Amino acid sequence: MAKDFYDRLGVTRKATPEEIKKAYRKLARQYHPDVNPNNKEAELRFKEINEAYETLSDEERRKEYDDLIAGGGASRGRAASSGGAGHPFEDFSGEGMGDFWDLFGGMGRGGGTILSEVHLTLTFREAALGAEKSVLLTDGSGKRPEQVTIRIPAGVEAGMSFTVQTVSGSRSRMIRVVIDEIRPDPLFRRQGSDLLLDCPVKLSELLYGATVTVPTLDGEARLKIPPGTKAGQTFRMKGKGVVSPVDHERGHLFVKILPVLPPRIPASLESCIRELDSHYPPDFRWKNP
């Protein structure tokens, strides 16, 4: 049974690309895992929304999906050779499997299309920047596994899945790739297409301002810290985030300023520090209402 991707995004079948994109963004913000931590229902909904948008945002794949829903047989041959990611079926079992095997040419038939599924664990940067991964695949016939290279698009997240096509001789293989886990990065944290970075600064840089070098996915960049910047203040570095694998727009890098003390403070500076303390207002910790 085919999915109704239009219902998932809350749009009609006549919706324009702009309407589809607007609906997707609204729902993605609502159900994003960062907004709904430990909410399995929201996590599943988020995956379904991404899957629907992945198909409906691509003109050719949307037409194939519409043809399939309408019962058009011509779309099947095109879909089998397109190599696009994703497919319009609920899963690999139960109702609708007959249509699925017809669409991709069967499994394990000589010279046809073979369906495989691989599960991957990626580093943070592999997921953010994209990567090529070599995997061993077998068609279940007991033959020697075949090594193929899979291109991972930039911006994937844990739980996402997509389909790629590889060709070896006269045989093609549709591979469903499932991203099981993304290892954390020692510097960056991710929220959707945005990145978060803590930037340690000296007290003098906080008080008098400075231009500091910060890491980004593209290499080092310069960030200007104005005089009098408050601890915890966050600056946005536009376009230094992650490219979304869905709408291909790039997020931002948000740099949080965190003042740190030197590892050792000599006793000779104690009087200066005490003098500095005397200039704090009585309610500096919490303002009186």
Image (cartoon, grey):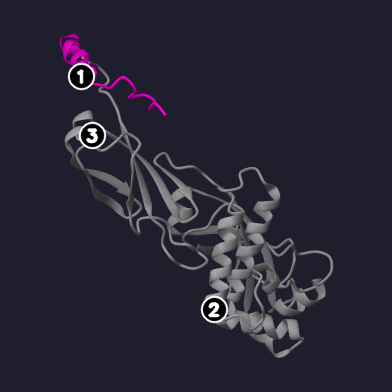
Q: Name the residue under label 3.
A: 206
Task: Judge left or right: residue 167 versus residue 263.
Answer: right
Cβ atoms under marks 2 and 3 closer than 8 Å? no
Between disc 2 and disc 1, the foreground one is 1
Residue beneath the point at 58% across and 52% down: 158
Residue 178 forms part of the magenta stretch:
no
Residue 284: image location, x then y, percent: 32, 24
Spatial separation of the CA atoms under disc 2 and disc 1: 59 Å
- What is the three-letter code of the residue carrying label 3? Leu
Q: Earlier in the sequence, mark 2 or mark 1?
A: 2
Q: As shown in the figure, which amino acid type bears the numbered disc 2?
A: Pro
Q: How far apart are marks 3 and 1 (CA)?
A: 14 Å
Q: What SS does tag 1 mark?
A: helix
- Nearer to the camera, 34 or 189: 34
Question: Which quarter of the figure has residue 37?
Answer: top right
Q: Name the residue under label 1.
A: 276
Tag 2 residue:
17
